[in-house]
Structure formats: structure tokens, C-alpha cells
């Protein structure tokens, strides 16, 4: 894992192909003051990652922030039977094979309300995604609703990135953007709520981490709404 914010936020990045494209994905690990670990969008668990997590703290909360980021949950269920698994809206029905102890709501769950805020980003008919804000590090954590592709992708991927409107441009992909247009009212309400958070960094699951001009980049991503 890489340290993103000293002693508080760590990330694990792995390759991930989607329809033949190498998007890559990342997990965000937050270490709470009580030494408990909050795992957001878990990546594939292996012995190295397991050892790093063990040294870091106690794996306590494992969160799937939307109904697409659930691929690697099985191994965590087996390895961390005492952890609490939380499902984003719509995921529990999709993954009936996994016992989720709780759901993610439009307000922070009691277990982490002192350190994290959260909300459900509404406006997309396909799915809802839970956004998180880590208060002490001023970090916004997003999964699929902001993505980007860059020069390190291959030629085909860069073309798709341009078509999708995300090449060198952190933004909702064009397919999600079209859905947001259909429900601008809820989309705008979600944008307004996020802007109430004083974030200066953004962790996204697919694309470069955003460590400068985060507010400006976020508002540019959603400026057409």
C-alpha cells in the first residue's frame, strides 16, 4: 500500500480490465483514531496486502460504495469474519451470497461519524453511489462518478477516454453524465451538498489522484448541471 495522508489514509492500486480496457482500480484504507481500519472499495486480497493491513490496524469496516465495486468481497468475508460489511444502495439484492451487516445511508454511520461524513449521490437512474469525506485530512473519496484516463493508457484506451469525455479530464463518464441530465434536480442537490465539505484532495477509483485544485476540478466535472 501507499501512504496518501500521513498515518491516516493509505491506498492500494491494482490492474483491472473493464470491457477490455485497463482502467485500474484502488482501495482506500482509513485508519481511525482507535486503530480500526475502514476499507473502501476493497481490492484483491493477497498475502502481502493481508500482512500490511495487519501491521496497520484492525480491519473493522469493509464498504462497497456502489453496486459495481464488489468483485473481491468474498475473500474478505472469509479472512475477516468479525469485520462489518456495508452495502451501497442496490448491492445487497445483487450479492445475496454475501451477508451484509448494514447499509450505507445518506448520513454518516454511527461507527465513524466523528471522522467521516457521507452522502448518497443521487441523480443517476443506473445506480447510486456513496461519497465520503474524511474530515481531518480534507479528502473527498469517490468511486465511479468521477474517472479519468491519461497518456499512460494504450491508444485504444485513450480513444475511448476521449469518447467518454474523461481523457485528461476528471469527470463522470459520458454514459453516467447522460443519466445525470435526466435527473438534474437530484444531481444539483448532490453537488451542492458535496460543496459544503471543505475538501482539498480527491481520491478516485479509476484515474490519477487529485491533490491540487480539488474543488475547482470537482465543480468543472459537474459544471453542466
Image: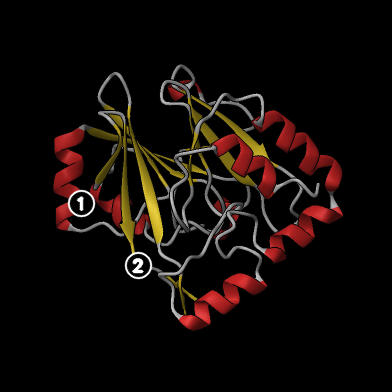
Mark closest to the chain's N terminus, 1 or 2: 2
Which residue is at a point 44% across and 23% down the rendered structure image?
112
Q: Is residue 178 visible?
A: yes
Give residue 71's position: percent from left, percent from top. 42, 62
Q: Is residue 120 left or right of residue 2?
A: right
Mark 1 Cα-neighbour bin, 10 Å: few <14, some 14–19, many ≥20:
some
Which residue is at a point 30% across and 19% down the rendered structure image?
33
Give residue 214's position: percent from left, percent from top. 55, 38
Coloring scheme used: secondary structure
Where is mark 2, residue-wise?
15
- Residue 145 in the image: above or below residue 136: below
- Residue 182 in the image: above or below residue 110: below
Q: Which mark is residue 27?
A: none
Where is mark 1, residue-wise?
49
Q: Could you tell me which secondary element the residue under label 2 belongs to?
A: loop
Give residue 130's position: percent from left, percent from top. 58, 41
Q: Is residue 104 visible?
A: no
Nearer mark to the viewer, of 1 and 2: 2
Which residue is at a point 26% across and 56% down the rendered structure image?
45
Q: Is residue 74 left or right of residue 197?
A: left
- Residue 210 in the image: above or below residue 134: below
Query: In the depicted view, which residue is nearer to us: 178 or 85?
Result: 178
Give residue 118's position: percent from left, percent from top. 57, 31
Query: In the depicted view, which residue is nearer to us: 117 or 137?
Result: 137
Q: Could you tell me which secondary element the residue under label 1 belongs to?
A: helix
Quadrant for residue 188, please give it: top right
Amino acid at each position: 500500500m501507499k501512504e496518501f495522508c500521513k498515518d491516516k489514509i493509505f491506498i492500494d492500486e491494482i490492474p483491472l480490465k473493464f470491457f477490455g480496457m485497463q482502467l485500474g482500480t484502488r482501495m482506500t484504507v482509513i485508519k481511525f483514531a482507535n486503530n480500526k481500519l475502514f476499507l473502501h472499495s476493497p481490492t484483491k486480497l493477497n498475502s502481502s496486502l493481508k500482512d500490511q493491513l495487519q501491521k496497520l490496524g484492525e480491519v473493522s469496516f469493509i464498504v462497497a460504495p456502489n453496486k459495481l465495486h464488489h468483485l473481491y468481497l468474498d475473500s474478505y468475508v472469509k479472512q475477516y469474519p468479525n469485520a462489518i460489511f456495508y452495502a451501497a444502495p442496490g448491492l445487497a439484492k445483487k450479492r445475496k451470497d454475501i451477508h451484509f451487516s448494514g447499509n450505507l445511508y445518506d448520513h454518516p454511520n454511527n461507527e465513524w461519524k466523528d471522522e467521516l461524513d457521507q452522502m448518497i449521490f443521487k441523480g443517476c437512474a443506473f445506480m447510486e453511489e456513496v461519497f465520503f469525506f474524511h474530515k481531518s485530512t480534507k479528502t473527498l473519496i469517490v468511486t465511479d462518478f468521477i474517472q479519468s484516463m491519461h497518456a499512460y493508457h494504450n491508444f485504444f484506451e485513450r480513444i475511448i477516454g476521449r469518447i467518454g469525455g474523461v481523457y485528461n479530464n476528471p469527470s463522470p463518464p459520458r454514459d453516467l453524465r447522460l443519466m445525470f441530465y435526466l435527473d438534474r434536480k437530484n444531481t444539483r442537490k448532490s453537488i451542492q451538498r458535496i460543496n459544503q465539505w471543505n475538501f482539498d484532495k480527491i481520491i478516485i477509483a479509476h484515474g490519477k489522484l487529485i491533490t491540487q485544485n480539488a474543488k475547482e476540478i470537482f465543480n468543472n466535472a459537474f459544471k453542466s448541471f
